[in-house]
Image: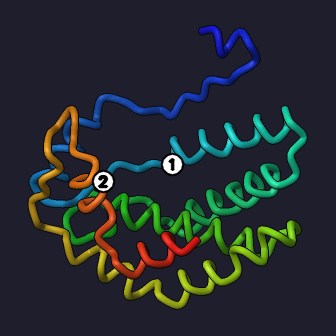
Amino acid sequence: MYLLLAGGGLYETGAGGSAPKHVDQFLAEGHLRWDSLGEILALAESLRFIGNKHDDAKLKALTEALDVANNAYLDNNKEPGRKVGQPDNKASHFFVAQYWADALAKGDNAELAEKFAPVAKALQDNEDKIIEELLAVEGQAQDIGGYFHPNDELAEKAMRPSATLNAIIDAI
């Protein structure tokens, strides 16, 4: 409450009561159909708030690029599929990252454009391989070390199964 009174922001993600069945499916089948669009839109608004509050050009550029990525995500129907074998949350996050890196590479902020141009190219060049690696774990039960208090290492392993994508992201 204090942070809100001190000028902070609160961003609703639209999370509802469907999460438990999504987690159950993920644990049983390795498929997470949760659509993170609400969280990603909230992230954009959080960045926008901070960028405007502090008049930060880099944050404004990051936000504008994330807006482009969110639009591309929607325009290209990259939401998670409901069934095993269809691209899930992991793939939708890949596409947001790909669209965001591309928007940053093409944006007006020279520093961000230089940093993200090779990332955007690597994501685009390796799209088929990354999606193949993400889909390879579909249909397999996942052990994340607990339902309410998962083990971070196990959860990361389950949610980041693409060695190709991990190498690109970790190099940033």
Q: Is residue 172 left or right of residue 24?
A: right
Looking at the image, the residue that sits furthest to the bottom is 125
Amino acid type, mark 2: Arg
Residue 103 bears which disc, if any? none
Q: Quadrant of the N terminus?
A: top right
Binning the other alpha carbons within 10 Å of mark 2 as few (below 14), some (14 to 19) or many (20 upward) gives many
Residue in front for this viewpoint, 153 or 37: 153
Determine whether, in the image, residue 17 is placed left or right of residue 65. left
Secondary structure under the numbered disc 1 in the rendered image: helix
Query: Which of 102/85 is in front?
Result: 102
Q: Where's the C terminus, which quadrant?
A: bottom right
- Residue 115: which quarter of the image? bottom right
Q: In this figure, which residue is indicated by the disc labeled 2?
A: 33
For the point 18% across and 60% down, the residue is 30
Q: How many marks?
A: 2
Above-or-below relation of 80 to 120: above
**Amino acid residing under circle 1:** Leu
- Comparing 28 with 73, the one in front is 28
Measured in 3D between alpha carbons, the distance from the residue under mark 2 to the one under mark 1, in whole angstroms, is 12 Å
Q: In this rendering, would 37 be left or right of 131?
A: right
Residue highlighted by disc 1: 37
Residue occupying the point 60% across, 44% down: 41
Name the residue located 55 percent from the left edge and 66 percent from the top edge: 97
Q: Secondary structure at mark 2?
A: loop
How far from the left and from the top, in percent, is residue 23? 21, 44
